[in-house]
Image: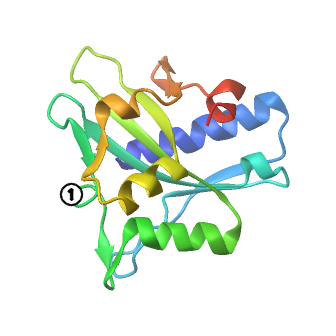
Amino acid sequence: MVDFEWELVDALNRFFEVEGVRAIAYRLKQSRYTPQVVDLLVDSPHPEYYMAIECKSVDARKAKTLYFTQHFSVAGGAHQIDRADQFLLKSGRRGLLAVELRRGPGRPKAAHFVSWEEVLQRFRSKEAGLPVERIETFPVVKRRGGCYLLSEENLAEI
C-alpha cells in the first residue's frame, strides 16, 4: 500500500510538472497513535487540483469488493469515510478514492479514481462496499515502465 501511495504522489507531481500546473502532491505522515484522515493531499490554486486522496490497494484475484468494514478503519468511534468526509467539507478539497487493483505476477496493476460522491453514496446507503466490477468503470491510470502515468483525462473524467 505504501508503495502505491508514493507511486501516486510521483505520478501526480510528474503530471503537474509536465503540464505546467501550479500544484504539489504529498503524502501525509502516518503515526501509530493518531488516525490519519486521508493518505495524500494536493495543494493548488486551481480548484480542480485542490484534492484529498484516500488510497487503497487490493488483490483483485481474491477480493471482489472493497469492503467498508474490512478495508477502512474506525478510530475514536468514527469510521474513516466519515472522518474523511468531514475533512473534505471543512477544507473545501475535492475528494477521491484511488484504488489499485493488483492481479498477481505477470499481470499489470492498474489504479482507478473513484469519485468521493460514489463512495459516500454507497457508504450512506449501507452497502457493504464497492465491487471491483464497479471500480473498474471509473477512470483508469495505467502504468508504463513501472510508473503510473496520469493524464488530463484521468482527472477530468471524475
Task: Please identify the residue farthest to the bottom as the structure is shown.
Answer: 76
Q: Quadrant of residue 15 in the image?
A: top right
- The three-letter code of the residue at mark 1 reads Gln
The answer to which of 127 and 26 lies nearer the viewer is 127
Q: Is residue 157 above or below residue 53?
A: above
Q: Is residue 36 above or below residue 53?
A: below
Q: Quadrant of the C terminus?
A: top right
Residue 151 visible in the picture: no
Q: Is residue 92 above or below residue 24?
A: below
Which color scheme did the rendering employ for the protein? Answer: rainbow
Which residue shows up at 77% across the image and 35% down it? 17
Which residue shows up at 27% across the image and 40% down it? 58
Left or right of 45 in this view: 66? left
Badge 1 local density, few (<14 within 10 Å), some, or many (20+)? few
Q: Quadrant of residue 157 in the image?
A: top right
Task: Please identify the residue farthest to the left as the structure is shown.
Answer: 62
Which residue shows up at 68% across the image and 61% down it? 93
Residue 32: percent from left, percent from top: 33, 76
Q: Quadrant of residue 60 in the image?
A: top left
Left or right of 87 in this view: 63? left
**Residue occupied by mark 1:** 70
Residue 45 visible in the picture: yes
Which residue shows up at 57% across the image and 44% down it? 9
Q: Secondary structure at mark 1?
A: loop
| Count of marks, rendered view | 1
Residue 54: percent from left, percent from top: 47, 54
Residue 142: percent from left, percent from top: 49, 21
